[in-house]
Image (tube, rainbow, N blue to C red):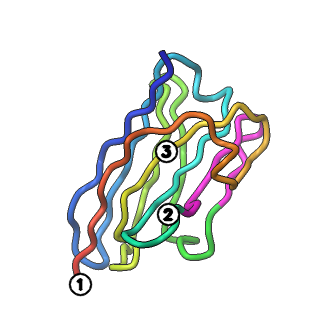
Amino acid sequence: EVQLVESGGGVVQTGGSLRLSCTASGFTADEYAIGWFRQAPGKEREVVSCISPSDRSTYYADSVKDRFFISSDNIKNTVYLQMDSLKPEDTAVYYCAAAARWLITTRVNDYEYWGRGTQVTVSS
């Protein structure tokens, strides 16, 4: 069974850091494009960051560039999202997702597998 499980969310003050983990089972994560998405109340789900399996190239949304960093650990079958300098507008449920694609994709509909999400709350 293919499964993605996120962890690492929580409540942090403005300027703080969190590291989210996305652990995959039932498939090899480094053979899929992995994306982190977030959804705030009343807003659409948006892409935050992605990593490709082909050359480990990465994508970051403008709103998180230079603050968030995506990485992977193939031995642990886990993808991480290091989030620094957090802002209240980063508050959302964060989801990881996997797409059977060799290249990066930022489109929500391209991702076949989704985790249940982890809540990130940044207090001002």
Q: Which residue is mark 3?
A: 96
Using the image as rendered, state which of residue 43 and residue 74 is in the foreground.
43
Q: Is residue 28 left or right of residue 67?
A: right
Name the residue furthest bottom: 124
Is 17 a magenta residue?
no
Front position among marks 2 and 1: 1
Q: Is residue 8 left or right of residue 85?
A: left
In terms of secondary structure, where does tag 1 sit?
A: loop
How far apart, in angstroms, are the residues tagged by discs 2 and 1? 19 Å
Lower position in the chain sequence, tag 2 or tag 3:
2
Front position among marks 2 and 3: 3
Q: Counting other residues with Cα less than 10 Å from the Cα at mark 1, is it few (<14), some (14-19), or many (20 or more)?
A: few
How far apart, in angstroms, are the residues tagged by discs 1 and 3? 25 Å
- Which residue is pictured at 67% across the width and 48% down the height? 109
Amino acid at pointer 3: Cys
Amino acid at pointer 2: Phe
The location of residue 7, given as percent across then percent down, is: 31, 42
Q: Quadrant of residue 17?
A: bottom left
Mark 2–mark 3 contact, CB under 8 Å? no
Q: Which residue is mark 2?
A: 68
Quadrant of the image containing the C terminus? bottom left
- Which residue is pictured at 62% across the width and 63% down the height? 60
Q: Which residue is mark 1?
A: 124
Q: Is residue 31 left or right of residue 23?
A: right
Q: Counting other residues with Cα less than 10 Å from the Cα at mark 2, is it few (<14), some (14-19), or many (20 or more)?
A: many
Which circle marks residue 113 in the picture? none
Using the image as rendered, state which of residue 109 and residue 100 is in the foreground.
109
The location of residue 122, given as percent across then percent down, is: 27, 72
**Boundaries of the magenta span:** 46-59
